[in-house]
Every structure is written in structure tokens, then in C-alpha cells.
Image (cartoon, coloured by chain):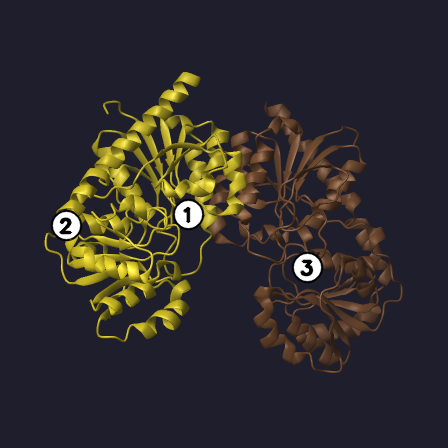
Chain colours: A yellow, B brown
């Protein structure tokens, strides 16, 4: 892409860009922003003040909202962020928002060329009227599955753009290891209990690297902690971004037995990048991310998951890596977004 | 006021207009709207679909958000409401918003002549940056005390407009009765415990007409319920709007021992309208609503409140009524808002 664009990236303020630990949306915003700068675009990042970027940073608050301490007024800070972005819409060729439907009225009232990537689940009927009202706003889904609840809303899908990760940060581990890995949050919809059942069933060690949010503390203590006292099960707690590649690369497989419509699932492609196949239930984006039988197995019941573990020998770890290199790199993601930006700006120019 | 204006009233959606039970903001929006219609203005009310009005109703959702049942996405509905209002700003001479700072970016981006009445407490530092950013937006405070936290923000105060009530709905009760009344919500900042202490201290019956919100259920059970088992104390529960005048009118005094910066306190003027003096702690708007020694007593400690009860003989109940008739009627409130509307429209015209 040769044309240099003036691009605003509007990040949520829950984590800095990139996040210190957990925070998928802010991490993807970071990858996208840095690569756009690398390609010569003039990028302005609206984010927390402690964010790290080569773009021009317009700081909104000193630190991320999702920190310990007194509860803050998330809405007021995001409203002000959007006000600052959209009061000068002509400063940008394209404004790329990652904050959901909150940005819609700003984009329309300012008449700005805007793109909205939707990062969350969309099966929330209370939000359907606002999506329907703003059905002219160009939306990006992060998987095809994510779009399902919006079938009848008539919204404007600009594209589905899969997340990408920087391959060099997830080195290929050709041999893998001997344990099953669980990585993420401890919460009912992630089904850590099912991962534990599977490990016990097939007699393979399970390592659980997961944070426990305050909201999930009771679930953890009541439902999960009693299951941990078993020679095969090891609970590690939350691990840093830098420790993840080794944790994933040394596993035999990642177990991802989710029970909710996960819109993307970064950990799936992180695992595959390290060469570690994924055994996952067929919720949300899973069937799009995993090539069933090639880079892992889509398995819904405990029986199916146990059969999948036995079939892991059939998976070529190099193929897992190759598929990420082909479909889920930062470079491919940014190629795709550049195409979408150009089509929106072109469309705008034609209609103007 | 002879000029006929096209006015939008933008209500919160937590209750219908007017509310069935509790809901101060929506009640005031209702009084204001009906009186403006009465005076010949062309009023459009943005509110819940079950609202009752002589204005043109633009329904947002069928029923109020604050109903039993699954939690709804308050924000999405209010965003959509504001979008509908501000996408056609030229339909109105003035847009009068009652939804707080959420409306600021809409008003500025649409370039609409807008007035914001602030109905809540303002001592919330997380919101200061957004108020500072939108300091050109004309604000109405509902008491002078409400403004205090904003001293250094440089915001634009259009006026302080006290709430008004329809006097005919609160008949004067010349004789009053023999009990102390507590009316409102059971919550720590309303200090029902202090009202109970006072009744026991002075040996006068106390009737508590109050709702218990789910969020306050634990406080009620732990802190208040144990205090109710006493011959002087009677807990009635939530009462309807129609039962309030009799409950207030038959009391010797209303006890209002609040412990938070109440921005207005409708129940104070309702009680005074019925002729019943008020004993209240000097928080928030209290010193503005009560003429100390004439229509009640501002008393902070239990000793001071007990002394106030003994001094109730000095209060002329007719004077309580007269002060409401002079300062807190719907008619006076609407006179005041009409003046503010005209000054904003005039200011707009001059600067245009």
C-alpha cells in the first residue's frame, strides 16, 4: 500500500496499549498501530497515558482503568476520549474505533470516515436497537461466527478481519511436550472443570495457567479448587506475556473447552504458532481458527475430547505453525485493514 | 411568556414519566413538560413508551428500565435516545436534557441549542474532566449547594432552578398529627437509624414509609430491622404517590437526617406543602429548602434534633405552606425555565 494515510486508532482504556498482562483488545490495537507506523502511515493513538507506541499518543488518563483501587467511571473517560477524537474529524483520513457502539453517534454526528472493529460478543439483545439505528456504520467482525446474532439487523459489514500475532514472539517448538495446557481466565464459560476431567480421563498431566478475577473468586473456590488436589493437575496461576510462548510450546496440546460464543480467542492462534495443536469445543470462532484434524480437533463432549487426545499423533506441529503464518500474522491483518481503509475512503470520495 | 417554543424534553429511561412510585427526576420532567404544554409550547417528550403526557411522546423503550427482571443495558438505550434527539437538532428551538454529561458530546457535535439540568450529586472526581472539556454547555443546578464540587471547573451555569410541585396534589393539613415521619429509601446515607434514635430519645412515635432496594437489603436486615422492634417505631414499607400527602400531612414533623450531599430533596418541599415542618441535617440543599426556625430546623446532632422536636410548637404550619407556594411551585419552576430558554435562544441568535 503506497498511499500514506492519517489514521486515528481509538483504544479502550481498560488496559494500556500494549497491556501488561491480560487484555486482548488493547494487544491487537497495539500490533495494528505499530505495524501501520512501520508502513509509513501517520498514526495517532488515543489510549492510556502509559501506553507504549511509535505512533503519536494522545493520552486520555494516566493509567489503565482495570487496575486495583477504587472503581472508576469507565463511561465518562471513554465519552471524553471520543469527544476529543471526533471534534476534529478532518485531522484524519480514517478513524478506527475499538470501543463498540459507544462511538456510533459520534461518527455519524461528526460525519467522519469511521471504521468500528467489534471485539466482544454480539448476542446482547439490548444493543440490537442501537446497531439497527446505526446500520450505516461500517463494522468489522473478528470472526464470521461473531456476526451470527446480527443476521436480521441489516448492519453494514465492511469485512471480517482475523486477529494477527507477531510470529517472532511465539517461536516454533517442534517437539512440544507431554502435558495438556489450559491458559486464560478461570470462569464458568471457559470450562476449566472440563479440562480437568479430560486430563484425569486420559491420564495426562494438565497445567493450568490462569488468572482468577475477583468476580470469579467464588466460582474458583467452590467449583475448581476442590478438583485441583490430584497428582495430574497443576495450578500455576497467572503468567506473563513473556512466559506464555514457553508454556504453550512445551505442551502436547492446548485444551480450550469453552462454553460461550468466543468472538476470536487469541490463545488458540498463539498455541498453534508455537506448534501446539488445540482441542476445542465448537463454540464461536473455534471452527474457523482450527483446521479440524490438521491443526487440532473440534470436540464437544468428553468422549470426543478424549478421542482427540489419542489422535494427537496424527497432527504435524509444523502444519500448525504454517497455518498461523498463512492466516494469522500481524502483517496479514494489517494488509487487510489497509484494504478496508482504502475502500472506505474511496467510497467516501465517490459519494462526496 | 408569549413566544411559542419548540422544546424537546429528554428524560432518563429508568422510570416512566411520571413514575409509578419512586423517581424524582422523571417526576420533575413530567411536571415541567405538562405545564409547558399548558402554556402553549410545542413540546416533544423523549421518554419510555408507557409515559403519560399531553406533549408529543417519542417512545424509546416500552417500559421503564428500573423494573424487576433481567438487568438491561441502560447505556445503549440512552445513547440511542440521544442519537434520535440530536440527529434533527433544527426541529427544536431548545433541547432540554435531564440525562447528565452523556448528552454533552451530542449537543456540541450537533451544534444544538441545549440546556442540561443536573439531577444528581456532582462530587464525582472521575467526571470532572468531561465537565471541564464541555464547560461551554449551559448547566442548570437544582440547588446552589449542588454546585460546590465544581468551583474550579469553569463550567457555564445558566441558573439554579429549584424543583416545583403541584400544590393541589399536596393539600394543606392545618393541624398535623402526633408522629414523626420518615419517607424515602432505606439506605445508609438517608440515616433511618438516626430517625429511630431520635424517636426513642424524645418518646414520640416514628412511622417509616420507605422502600428497600435490593442493593440495600443487607443494610436493612443487619442495621435497621433490629431497631424496629420497639413500641414507638412502625415500619410501613413503600407507599404510593397518592398516599404520601396524607402520610406527610398527619405527621408532627418530617425527619430528614441525611448524611450525603442531597442535590434537592423533593420530600422536604412535599412535607412543607402539607404544612408539616422538617427537621433535617445540614447536608446538601437542606439549608436552602428549610427556613431555619420558620419552616423547620436544621439540626445536625441527636441533641440538636431532640431540641428541635421540643421547639416544634414555635413553627406555624401555615408558614410552611406559604413558603412552598412562594418558592417551590411548578408554575414558578416553569417561569424560571422559560426565562432560561429565552436567554439561551437569544444568546444563540446574537452570536449567530
- Alpha-carbon distance for marks 2 and 3? 73 Å
- Alpha-carbon distance for marks 1 and 3? 46 Å
The chain letter under disc 2 is A
Q: Quadrant of the N terminus of chain B?
A: top right
A145 w.r.t. B264: above or below: above
**Picture coordinates of residue B313 (x, y %)?**
84, 71
The reply to the same-chain question for discs 1 and 3 is no
Q: Which residue is mark 2?
A: A317
**Picture coordinates of residue B66 (x, y %)?**
62, 54
The picture quadrant where one finds residue B60 is top right
Query: Tags 1 and 2 in contact by the CB under 8 Å rule?
Result: no
- Alpha-carbon distance for marks 1 and 2? 30 Å
Q: Which residue is mark 1?
A: A121
- Count residues near mark 2 (Cα–Cα under 10 Å), then give few for <14, some for 14-19, many for 20+: many
**Picture coordinates of residue A161 (x, y %)?**
32, 37
- Closer-to-camera residue (A82/A114): A114
A235 w.r.t. A133: above or below: below
The chain letter under disc 1 is A
Q: Which mark is residue A258?
A: none
Left or right of A309 on screen, residue A258 = right
Visible in this render: residue B259? no
Left or right of B84 on screen, residue A278 = left
Label 3: state its secondary structure.
Answer: helix
Q: Which residue is mark 3?
A: B286
- Count residues near mark 1 (Cα–Cα under 10 Å), then give few for <14, some for 14-19, many for 20+: some
- Closer-to-camera residue (A310/A139): A310
Left or right of B173 on screen, residue B148 = left
Q: Which residue sits at x=20%, y=49%?
A: A272
Q: Earlier in the sequence, mark 1 or mark 2?
A: 1
Amino acid at each position: 500500500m503506497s498511499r500514506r494515510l492519517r489514521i486515528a486508532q481509538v483504544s479502550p482504556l481498560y488496559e494500556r496499549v500494549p497491556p501488561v498482562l491480560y487484555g486482548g483488545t488493547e494487544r491487537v490495537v497495539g500490533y495494528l498501530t505499530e505495524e501501520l507506523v512501520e508502513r509509513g502511515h501517520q498514526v495517532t493513538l488515543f489510549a492510556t497515558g502509559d501506553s507504549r507506541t511509535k505512533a503519536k499518543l494522545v493520552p486520555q488518563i494516566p493509567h489503565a482503568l482495570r487496575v486495583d483501587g477504587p472503581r472508576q467511571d469507565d463511561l465518562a473517560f471513554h465519552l471524553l476520549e471520543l469527544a476529543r477524537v471526533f471534534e476534529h474529524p478532518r485531522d484524519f483520513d480514517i478513524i478506527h474505533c475499538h470501543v463498540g457502539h459507544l462511538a456510533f453517534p459520534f461518527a455519524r454526528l461528526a460525519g467522519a470516515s469511521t471504521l468500528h472493529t467489534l471485539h466482544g460478543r454480539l448476542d446482547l439483545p439490548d444493543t440490537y436497537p442501537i446497531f439497527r439505528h446505526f446500520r450505516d456504520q461500517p463494522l468489522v467482525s473478528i470472526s464470521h461466527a461473531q456476526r451470527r446474532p446480527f443476521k436480521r439487523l441489516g448492519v453494514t459489514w465492511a469485512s471480517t478481519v482475523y486477529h494477527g500475532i507477531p510470529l517472532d514472539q511465539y517461536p516454533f517448538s517442534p517437539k512440544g511436550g507431554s502435558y495438556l495446557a489450559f491458559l486464560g481466565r478461570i470462569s464458568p464459560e471457559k470450562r476449566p472443570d472440563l479440562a480437568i476431567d479430560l486430563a484425569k480421563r486420559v491420564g495426562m498431566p494438565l497445567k493450568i495457567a490462569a488468572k482468577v478475577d475477583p468476580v470469579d473468586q467464588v466460582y474458583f473456590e467452590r467449583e475448581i479448587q476442590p478438583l485441583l488436589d490430584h497428582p495430574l493437575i497443576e495450578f500455576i496461576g497467572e503468567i506473563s506475556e513473556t512466559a506464555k510462548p514457553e508454556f504453550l510450546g512445551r505442551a502436547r496440546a492446548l485444551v480450550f473447552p469453552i462454553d460461550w460464543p468466543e468472538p476470536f480467542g487469541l490463545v488458540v492462534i498463539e498455541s498453534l504458532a508455537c506448534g501446539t495443536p488445540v482441542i476445542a469445543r465448537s463454540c464461536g470462532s473455534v471452527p474457523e481458527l482450527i483446521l479440524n484434524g490438521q491443526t487440532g480437533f473440534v470436540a464437544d463432549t468428553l468422549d470426543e475430547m478424549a478421542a482427540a487426545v489419542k489422535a494427537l499423533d496424527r497432527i504435524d506441529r509444523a502444519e500448525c505453525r504454517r497455518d498461523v503464518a498463512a492466516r494469522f500474522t500481524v502483517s496479514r491483518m494489517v494488509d487487510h485493514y489497509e484494504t478496508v481503509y482504502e475502500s472506505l475512503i474511496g467510497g467516501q470520495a465517490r459519494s462526496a
